[in-house]
Structures are given as C-alpha cells and as structure tokens.
Amino acid sequence: MSTRETPAKTCGLRERKKAKTRVAIRQAAYRLFAERGYEATTVDQIAEAAEVSPSTFFRYFPAKEDVILSDEYDGALADALAARPADEPVVQAVRRSMTESFGQVLEADREELFTRIRLTFTDPGIRARAMDEQLRNQDAVAAAIAERTGRDAADLEVRCAAAALIAVSMTVMRHWVDGGGTEDLIALYDHHLGILFEGLRL
Amino acid sequence: MSTRETPAKTCGLRERKKAKTRVAIRQAAYRLFAERGYEATTVDQIAEAAEVSPSTFFRYFPAKEDVILSDEYDGALADALAARPADEPVVQAVRRSMTESFGQVLEADREELFTRIRLTFTDPGIRARAMDEQLRNQDAVAAAIAERTGRDAADLEVRCAAAALIAVSMTVMRHWVDGGGTEDLIALYDHHLGILFEGLRL
DNA sequence: CGAAAACTGACAGTGCACTATCACTTGCGA
DNA sequence: TCGCAAGTGATAGTGCACTGTCAGTTTTCG
C-alpha cells in the first residue's frame, strides 16, 4: 500500500498534519482488516497501529465503518462521465470514462486499489457496506445517461442500463482480484462492457 | 404481513411450536424494523414483541442480522432455473424462471414481500446485508447459464451476464417499491430483462 | 406413568462501539 | 512572544450484541 492518498493541497502545518493522521488511520485500518478481517479488528487496535488515541480515531471518523466509505474515489466515475465530450455516443462515453478513471487510480495506487477491491469482495464486514456505493454509482451513471440521451434519469430503462453497467463493472473487478490482479483490468473492462451493448448472446 | 411463512410439514407438536416461534420472531422483527429501522431496533425489543425471552431469540437466530438472511426465498431462483426444460433457450429460461418464482411468492405473500423488498432498499442496516444475497444469486444464475450453454461457470462472460441479469432484477424491484408496489412486477420484469438481450440501445 | 430429552427464561457477565468531559499540548495570528 | 483556538489523550461511562449457566417446564417415548 503506497503512502499517497489525497495530495495535501493546503499549506498550513495543521492541515498537513491532519491529512497525514487521516491517511495513517486509514492505512493502519486497511492493513489490519486485510490481516484479520473487518469485524475482528477493533477501533482500539486501529488507533494503536496508527499511533493515535481511540478518541482521535472517532474525531476523524464518526464511526468505524466510515473508514471504508470511499471519500476519495467516490464520484470519480460520475465526474469522468461528465467530462466526456457531449457529442460522444453514450456507449463510448461510459466505456472510456470507466477505463479512464480506473487507469488513473491504477497507476497511482495499484496496491492499495487491489487490497481495497479484494476486501470489498472477500471480507463479509466490508462487503456489506459495498451495496451503498453500488447504488450511488448506479444513480450517478443513470443521471449521466439521462443527460446525454435527453431521457429521464428516473426512467426505468435508463436505470436498468446503469445497473447493468455497474454490475458488469463489479464482476470484472471481482474476477480481477480473483486472478491476483495480474490481468489487464482495462482490457477486461473494455471487452465485457462492450458485450453488454451488443446484447447477451446466450 | 400475512401469517404464513414456511408451511410446517412436520407433525410433532414440538416441531410445530418451534416453527411458530421462528415465524413470530421474524414477523415481530420485521414489523419493528419497518417502524423504527434495523439499527434502532434492539434484540430485547424483538424478543418482547415476539413474546419470548432474549435467550430464546439467540437460540433461533445466532445473530441479530440472521433474522433478515433469507432462509426461505434463498435459492428459489436457482431452483426455478434448474426446473426449466433443458432444451429451452437460456434467454427464455431465465426470464420465465424469474417471473415464475416471483409470481408464486407474490400471490402467497404480497404484503410481506413488499415490506421485505422495501426495507432492502430503504433501511441502511438491512441494505448492507443485501450484497451477500446478490452475489449468491449471481453465482447461482451463472451456474445455471453455464450448465445450459456448456460453458464454464467461471467464464467471465457468463458471470457478467448473470450479474447484469441480477442487477436488472434488483433495479426493477427497486422501482416497484418506489411506486408503492402498484405496478405489475411480472410485466416490468419481463420487459426489462428482454432489453438486456437485445443490447442496450443508447 | 415415569424417565429422558428438548426447550425455555432468568441472570450474570464480556467485549466493543461510541460519547462526554477535562486537562494538556501545539500551531496560528496579532 | 503572547494569547487563543484547535487538536490530542486519558479516563470514565453507556448501550447493546452476544455468551454461559442453571433451574424449571414441556414434549416425547418406552
């Protein structure tokens, strides 16, 4: 797991320290989660590993589970989608923005991303929290599709399309971690997202 | 919420009592969950509402969260799929088994099903547990597809197809509860599953 | 009916997430 | 450099999920 998380863009010493502490806590937490599982890891252990007091942990994260809620990556997909040229066909836009936003993170933090995704699928405690993110992502994609096609974001067909996209995305990730992260995630993505648009041939 | 849950097929008085208690606990739990939310409901409250002792609660359900793990419906989809004629094309088989297995439950227990699905999407505590069921269902469908097509169940394309199917299914359910359960679930299902096979036209 | 087995409730106790308080330290602006 | 605000740690305490034990009751079976 690398050292970087959010590039501290503020200059004050205080702010920098806070950012470092936040990262330290999160890294310690993920390391312990990976070692012994989410449920089996206590807040006290995380605090000790991060060399802060339990009180401080709760000052940074209102609850234990908030350590895994994806502040950083959250909305990345939606942003990438919004950034695609407006005249690009939806199919392309979705595919590209997914592979793009992933490519960035992959380069920057391959190890951390891998651990994170792996735990999302393997650790029962963490897996449980994944549903929320999935639903959020679905809604974001649905909104993007709606805007691009001029359809309503509440349109069930639009929402189904978004759901299918996210589902395929999750499945590809799951496969990727099952294979130890050795395969080319971008290629897997690109191929299987394409299948969705051609229709399931079964 | 109706009184029925699992038709007690055993004859001994003991067995019948146990089944009744189990149902009573579950119903009480769901009623309270619907009233005040999963997290805000304590085991003691459930026990009191079900007129048993807290000890007894834990004898029936090893943990609070097990009250919502779907013993009854679990695997219903997989079973329905397996029961479809082997020569039926996969597309049809999946669509039919989904609408079929749902139709049965709908007739038997519309209210309970509605509450259950609604909470799955609205209550954060319960929603968290839905991911596991989703993954299980995905794997079951993937297995069924694999068997029917002679492909490998671990084949990523097969798993993506299964994931997309389940995702659409979930989205339809979500829409259904958003609309208060008034729309024709089977029709929604049938239509949107079909779209998946024709390919997302966007 | 009588003994064995299953089931239940009451009670005491543990571990952990989370809160509240307060004295102490550290960075910041004047 | 001084005063203030922000951040930290220690401590004590709460609520709830969950465990273990034991005595009393109910069901079953010979």
Image (cartoon, coloured by chain):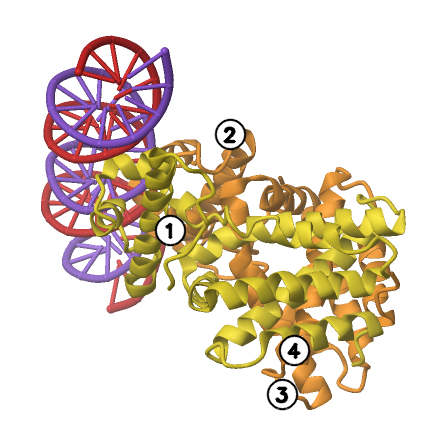
Chain colours: A orange, B yellow, C red, D purple
Q: Which mark is residue A91?
A: none
Query: Which one is in front in this view, the residue at disc 1 or the one at disc 2?
Result: 2
Towards the viewer: C28 or B110: B110
Labels 1 and 2 touching (C-beta < 8 A):
no
Mark 1 and mark 2, same subunit?
Answer: yes
The residue wearing badge 4 is B187
Labels 2 and 4 touching (C-beta < 8 A):
no
> Cα distance, mark 1 to mark 4?
48 Å
Residue at figure coordinates x 45%, y 61% from the top left: B116
Dot 4: few (<14), some (14–19), or many (≥20) neighbours within 10 Å? few
> Cα distance, mark 3 to mark 4?
20 Å
The residue wearing badge 3 is A152
Say what amino acid the circle numbered 4 marks. Ala
Residue at figure coordinates x 65%, y 78% from the top left: B187
The residue wearing badge 1 is A60
Q: Position of residue A163 (x, y in %)?
A: 66, 68
Q: Chain of mark 3?
A: A
Mark 2 and mark 3, same subunit?
Answer: yes
Labels 3 and 4 touching (C-beta < 8 A):
no
Query: Which one is in front in this view, the residue at disc 3 or the one at disc 4?
Result: 4
Labels 2 and 3 touching (C-beta < 8 A):
no
Query: Which one is in front in this view, the residue at disc 1 or the one at disc 4?
Result: 4
Mark 2 and mark 4, same subunit?
Answer: no
The residue wearing badge 2 is A36
Q: Is residue B26 above or below residue D17?
A: below
